Structure formats: C-alpha cells, structure tokens
Amino acid sequence: MQLHSHNATEKEVKSAMKDLGIQRAKLHGWPNTYSFTKAMGEMLVLAFADNLCAIILRPTIITSTYKEPFPGWIEGARTMDIFVLMYGKGKSNFMIGDPDSILDVIPVDMVVNSMLAAVVHHDHNRRERSSPSSFIYHIGSSDSNVCRPLKLCDVISMMYRYFTNNPWTSMRGEVVKVREYVLLPSITSLRRYITIHYLPLLQVLKLMNMLLYHYFDDKCAAVEKNISMVIRFAEIYRPSLLILVLHRLNTMDTLYR
C-alpha cells in the first residue's frame, strides 16, 4: 500500500516485494524465500500430522527425465537449467561457486516414482507413523554416488564441451560462441568481477546511446538486466553453490527395499 501511495509501478512493487521476502527469510535463518516458505509449509504439516495422512518429500535439484515419458524431457526452466541456458545463450559466463561443491541432482521421473511409492506405502501403513522421520523422505543421488559425486566443476566442463560442439543459434540466426566459465568464491568477488569487466563497457555503451539519440536503449537495458539477474541468482543460490555436503537418503532407501 505504501508503494502504491507513492505511485510506484508494478515492476517496482514486484522488485520491492522480492527484496522484502529475502530479508524476511534471512531474518529467520533461511537463505532465500524458496526454502523459507517450504519450511513454513512443512511446519504446518507437522503441526497437524496427527490428523492428516500426509508425507513430506524433499527432492534435491530436479533435472530433466531419465526415461519417462522420454529421456531429457522437462517443462520450463528451473534452478540449474537457468544457469545452463544463460551460459549457452551467451548472457553470462560467470557465477559464484566452489568447484568441488556437490550438485545433488535427481531426474524428475525418479522424483515422481518416489512420490508414488511413498504415497502407496503410507496409504497401506497409516499406523506406522510414530515420528516425523517415518514420513519425511529426502530424494536425491549424492548419497548413492559417494565414490564419485557430481561436482560443480564437472557440470561446468560438460556445459563448455556441449555448447562448443553444439552452439546456440539465436532467433536472428547468429551463432553464439561460448567462453570458458569463471567461478568466483563470494558475492564480493562477483561484484568486483562485474565492476572490472562489465561496468566500463556498460558506461561506454550508455555514452554512445546518449550521443546517438538513444539508439542503444534496448541494448543498455538488456545488459543491465543480465547483470542484475546474475547478482540476484548468486544471492538466491549461494548456499547450494558453496557447500560441500552429501544428503542422507536413509528413509528413501528403506522404502525402495
């Protein structure tokens, strides 16, 4: 209401609400609004668990299908897909991250199969729910790949090889040539990298735009949008890109057996 009273645009209101959401999440110890609201939902389920036939499933990074309905299918772009698309389209070749950070990924059809198995099991064994640990399932792959877990450096190497051999072609028919990916250890180093490598070019572009009667308005807006997007994604996904952990999948393994 306060923003509307100052005649803020819908875009400004949306941006302010996003920032407020992240501030509120961090206030309560969560890295972003996604994990914060998921935790709130789980708390509600646990509060009414005695009167509900419910299960809680916690999938890790969901990727395209392994097999069903066909290999590689996915709807929309989520989490890891966003970084891959931005890189392939030439929009960004840098991000924060530890090369040895473990990416616990799981194909979406395996997530669906796990959900169905858990639903059937708990529908047949409703009286077994003695504690939350009996109906909370972590769905992932890192625990079963202890000897050779998928690391961030592996994904970056695969991205570079793939888009080098299969370059993205824009709507104008332009072939995008990717550069090697740059990993930075912190948000501070990310901002410094942008300041050194991108802001001078943006300032020159803005000067040319002013001299040429706003001929490059769209280009300036696109560059600023890409920079803002990279910083926002870095802040949102920082916990996933800088941690060295394996997820224990005990309850899921027990269910499979």
Image (spheres, rainbow, N blue to C red):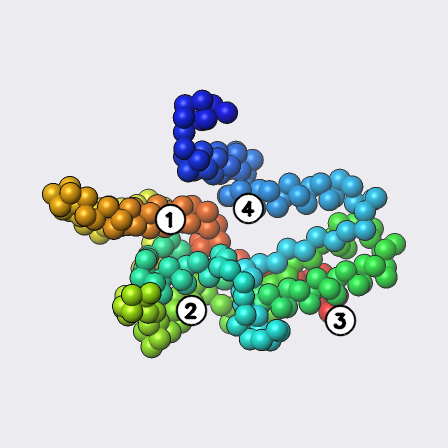
N-terminal-most mark, 4 or 1: 4
Q: Residues within 10 Å of mark 3 (few under 14, many from 20)?
A: few
Q: Can you give x and y, in whole percent of width and height, for residue 124 in the image?
A: 86, 61
**83 relative position to 177: left or right:** right
The kind of secondary structure element at disc 4 is helix
Name which residue type carries label 3.
Arg
Asked if residue 142 shows in the view, the reply is no
**What is the crowding at mark 1: few (fewer than 14 residues within 10 Å), some, or many (at least 20)?**
some
- Residue at position x 45%, y 55% in the image: 241
Mark number, residue 229: 1
Counting from the top left corner in percent of width and height, residue 132 is at 75, 49
In this picture, is 149 found above or below 27? Answer: below
Q: Nearer the viewer, residue 99 or 34?
A: 34
Marks 3 and 4: which is nearer the front? 4
Q: Residue drawn 54% across and 63% down?
A: 75
| Mark 3 to mark 1 CA distance (whole Å) | 43 Å
Q: Which mark is residue 154?
A: 2
Measure the C-alpha gap from mark 4 to mark 2. 26 Å
Q: Amino acid at mark 4?
A: Tyr
Q: Are marks 4 and 1 in contact (CB under 8 Å)?
A: no
Q: Which residue lies under the disc numbered 4?
A: 34
**Is residue 110 among the parts visible in the rendering?**
yes
- Which of pointers 3 and 1 lies earlier in the amino acid sequence? 1
In the image, 79 versus 131, the foreground residue is 79
Q: Which mark is residue 257?
A: 3
Q: Are marks 3 and 4 in contact (CB under 8 Å)?
A: no
